Amino acid sequence: MEVSCKILRRSTHSFLQNYHYFTSTAAFLAFPFSASILLSQALVPSPSSLLPQIYSRLRTLFDAAGFPSSSQLFSILNLKVSQTITSSIFTLPFTLTFLLIAKASVIQALNHHKPTLPPSFKSVLVLYKPLLHTYFCNCFLILSANATSFGLLFLAFSFFERLGYSSPSGLILFMSVAGAVLFSVILANALVICNMALALSGMERHGGYLAILKACLLLRGRTSMALFLALPVNVTLAAIEALFQFRVVRPYHIAGITRPCVALEGIFIAYLYSIFIILDTIVSCMFYKSLEAITWIGHEDKHLFRIEFPDEEDTYGYMDTKELP
């Protein structure tokens, strides 16, 4: 807990030290992505969106897998997964461009320590390529985490159905709650690994599945610390999304039109969302810097190893581990 608080203080100090750069260049680069996220939350519930189709397909899949369709928890889980998929499809172009470019600009600023000038296109492009490669690998990791969660739930419910507990009972309710908790834990750990992999890709300028592997090694035994560091920013982002729904979306549904003052307030809320995305990137980079010197494999033999990424000219690519002196 003490180390996590120190990392948060260092991240806040770095943000305030380079306040003008992070609140101007980096924040405006992330602004289109932030606006797309907030707008997707308003467009997802509409009947013309993909949400009803995705929701019905997932419900059919859950019913075929033997999940209790009458369970309120699985109905909520189905709805949240459907909303996440729909929102991800809507924001994907902005994620692959503006979000990754904003993260690249922040990481470059932290590497050079003096971000007095806007980053050149070439320098950002150097960091953008490994970030893009790692992001695609992160997508497969998230899909694998969801598939693993649903696979475990399928096996559990199939086992208890064979025992004769298919009818609604207290055991089924307990299994539903346990399944929701298991799904949340697996997904939270996967997201933390993906976040660290992106920061690592930018700091070391190497992306792909090797970045995810090294992120797993860095977070080994420190998952609780990573979750604690991610909690404040994610809670704040969720609060900003709720504020946008209350101050912008709700008046629009009531009045049927968007007033200029409400539109300006929506722009300010999207800018605030961008600021915390920048803060989240800074926290991830500071967390990586605190762990980069202590990467190891195996605690029993007390031998330290490091992972070496393949060189750019190596067309085949390999992973090498060397014992540190």
Image (tube, rainbow, N blue to C red):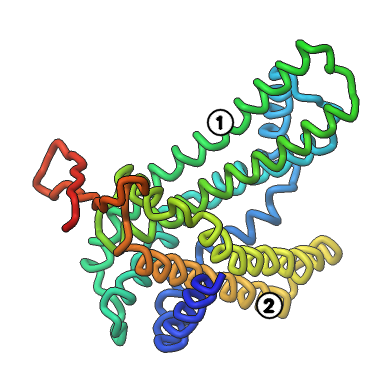
Q: Type of residue at label 2?
A: Glu
Quadrant where the image shows the N terminus? bottom right
**Identity of the residue drawn at 39% across and 83% down:** 21
Quarter of the image where one finds residue 57: top right
Which mark, by number, is residue 265? 2
For residue 246, what is the image quadrant?
A: bottom right
- Residue 133 shows in this picture: no
The residue drawn where x is 73% and y is 65% is 242
- Label 1 – label 2 distance at C-alpha: 41 Å
* Residue 169 drawn at (x, y percent): 90, 25
Amino acid type at image mark 1: Thr
Q: Is residue 227 visible?
A: yes
Image marks 1 and 2: residues in contact by CB distance under 8 Å: no
Image position of 307 (left or right of 234): left
Identify the residue at image location x=70%, y=42%.
181
Q: Quadrant of the C terminus?
A: bottom left
Residue located beneath label 1 in the image: 148
137 left or right, relative to 182? left
Of residues 225 and 120, the one nearer the viewer is: 225
At which x and y percent is residue 201?
31, 56
Q: Image height check: is 26 above or below 62?
A: below
Lateral position of residue 313 relative to residue 317, left or right: left
Estimate the x, y position of residue 26 in percent, counting from the top left.
Answer: 42, 74
Residue 152: quarter of image: top right
Report the front residue among 121 and 64. Answer: 64
